Amino acid sequence: MSIEAKNISKRFGQFVALDNVDLEIPSGELVALLGPSGSGKTTLLRVIAGLEFADSGTVRFDGRDISDRTARERRVGFVFQHYALFRHMTVFENIAFGLKVRPRDTRPSKKQIQEKVHELLKLIQLETLAQRYPSQLSGGQRQRVALARALAVEPSVLLLDEPFGALDAKVRLELRRWLRQLHDEIHITSVFVTHDQEEALEVADRVVVMNQGRIEQVGSPEEVYNHPATPFVYNFLGNVNLFHGRLEGDKAYIHEQKTGEVVYVRPHLLDIGRQPNGGSHFRARIKHINAAGPLVKVEAIAEWGDPVHIEMSQEKFSDLQLSKNESVFVIPKDVKVFSNHKA
Amino acid sequence: MATTVALRNLWITRDRAAQATTERAWVRWLLITVAILFLGVFLFLPLAVVFASAFAKGVSVYFAALREPDAMAAIRLTLLAAGIAVPMNLVFGISAAWAVGKFEFVGKSFLVTLIDLPFSVSPVVSGLIYVLLFGLQGLMGPWLVAHDIKIIFAVPGIILATTFVTFPFVARELIPLVQAQGNEEEEAALTLGASGWQTFFRVTLPNIKWGLLYGVILCNARAMGEFGAVSVVSGHIRGRTNTMPLHIEILYNEYQFAPAFAVASLLALLALVTLFVKTAVEWKARQHAEQQEIAGALGARATTALGAKAA
């Protein structure tokens, strides 16, 4: 089912959570709402779910206006950051809840419910834990149960609020890959909220980057990462070096003053050389080297005094034989210039 | 096997913790003696006196005092007042806790303060409020007389006063509980298609049931034992508007000590039963929580092991 949010605004007292937001999500897509805390991403998700009502604007499912419908009538599957499992019910009862509370004429029989729950338990690979209580499960297991519970009612869309936020790093990685797989199998329109850019870029078909109640950019992970529309998006998606300068033709001249255009360069798009290569370059002194991990991270001080972060492969690093306090040339491979934005 | 090892480790840790934080012997004995002496003088001795005095003139006098018509009427009235006041405050307490705990609205802190009012006002004043409202010279007195409705010096007044005095018990017990539990489970139920009532009975109520029971027990004990407020509105009409505490006072003032203590022993017994049930409820609730905690710790460990194997 496709989702369309139009002109959505929402305030909490003086705080503007959503400022005239427009968003279209085609049927069957897995979309990430990405942004820092307070950017309005969770509020937008809750407005779509009907757990929060917008001050103005409309929400449509498949073209039908459902702005006035309650969460109960919208038939959405919602997964909460802290699972929100019913603590006094077993895993089985939790998953069966949505089916058991249906009005008598549409309620499946006991046997049908049992079959459905077992099917879902199989899907989340927790068949042996049906009789456990939520407190007896690990975080990752709880979140999978929450997902199965949401799917049990065969929702038209699946909404997930920071679904991996409360889990530790390793489980988080496993679970998000599993979610991607699951989505490839069942193709339900899904929206998940996250503040973790890596998670959004890895899992989603499309990423919606939000900031201060507005949408900054919507696009595929490649688009938003390689062709950021605004300085905010460039800044938020990955590490970045930030220089000030002026633009003449297609050349940027970097200078010390904090004025003029802002030049963005990702650390891995900076090269280090012992000799200037004839193109653009500047001098820097190496201050710190961190060689742990797949990439070597070098922190240097540029000739005008600002710190510069550079990333390179381990091979390149051992070829260069860099040492601390050495003076080198930094050669930008690709830069992005945003004119006259406040940085 | 893993279970027993884990449990034993748990106990050993607790013992060590106890050793590290314990006081010297004489300090412990001093504190324990003071506590026992205090309890003895202020709690056990009076309780013993009540029962001893009740049976001072023999078992037959004791039961005669209870079977006497005025005493029976007082017992019935007390049960009636509690039987109406407690359910009313149960419903009120749950709705107040629900409103305060789950929603944000203007005047919320005012409402919470208002709920505490009966605790902060002297019971005599609580009774007087109703006399001033519904008494002959009261605000609504003439209208009530015209319609031949009696509230003050009658059963309705006693029920009103009892309800007022026991008003905060259930609400006070539930509000912090409901606030701590938050909204998420209710929201989850809602998105799964549950109606308001279904959400309440299947999700909210099971989560607060121990707190609720505890509040009801305390509420009931106070409803049956209330003296001050009820005394003001009752009019002390024997056999008609006397509750047990009032009946005891009258007997005592007439120097009928044995019957007075006999009825008093019933109230004391009620207190003991209340304490017992309260302890049982607390124990049961704690056991429930602990069991889940231990099972949770073990379960998580066992399943990680399983997960590791599967991986």
Image (spheres, rainbow, N blue to C red):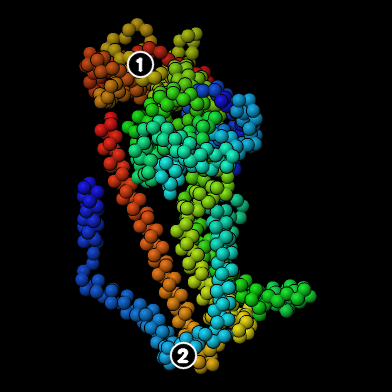
For the point 34% across and 80% down, which residue is it?
Answer: B40
Residue A165 image-quadrant placement: top left
Left or right for A149, reference B69: left
Left or right for A99, reference B31: right
**Is residue A2 visible from the viewing direction of this image?**
yes
Name the one closer to the observer, A142 or A21.
A142
Mark number for residue B61? 2
For the point 25% across and 33% down, which residue is it?
Answer: B309
Name the one closer to the observer, A256 or B193.
B193
Crowdedness of circle 1 by 10 Å Cα count: few (<14), some, many (20+)? many
**B167 w.r.t. A43: above or below:** below
Name the one closer to the observer, B143 or B298.
B298
State the residue position of label 1: A270
Element class at badge 2: helix
Q: Mark 1 lies on which chain?
A: A
Element class at badge 1: strand
**B168 w.r.t. A81: above or below:** below
**B25 w.r.t. A275: above or below:** below
Q: Which chain carries label 2?
A: B
**What amino acid type is highlighted by mark number 2?**
Val
**What amino acid type is highlighted by mark number 1?**
Leu
Mark number for residue B268? none
For the point 75% across and 74% down, which residue is it?
Answer: B144
List x then y, in percent, for residue B242: 59, 82
List x then y, in percent, for residue A239: 39, 24
List x then y, in percent, for residue B214: 46, 63
Crowdedness of circle 2 by 10 Å Cα count: few (<14), some, many (20+)? some
List x then y, in percent, for residue B195: 58, 45
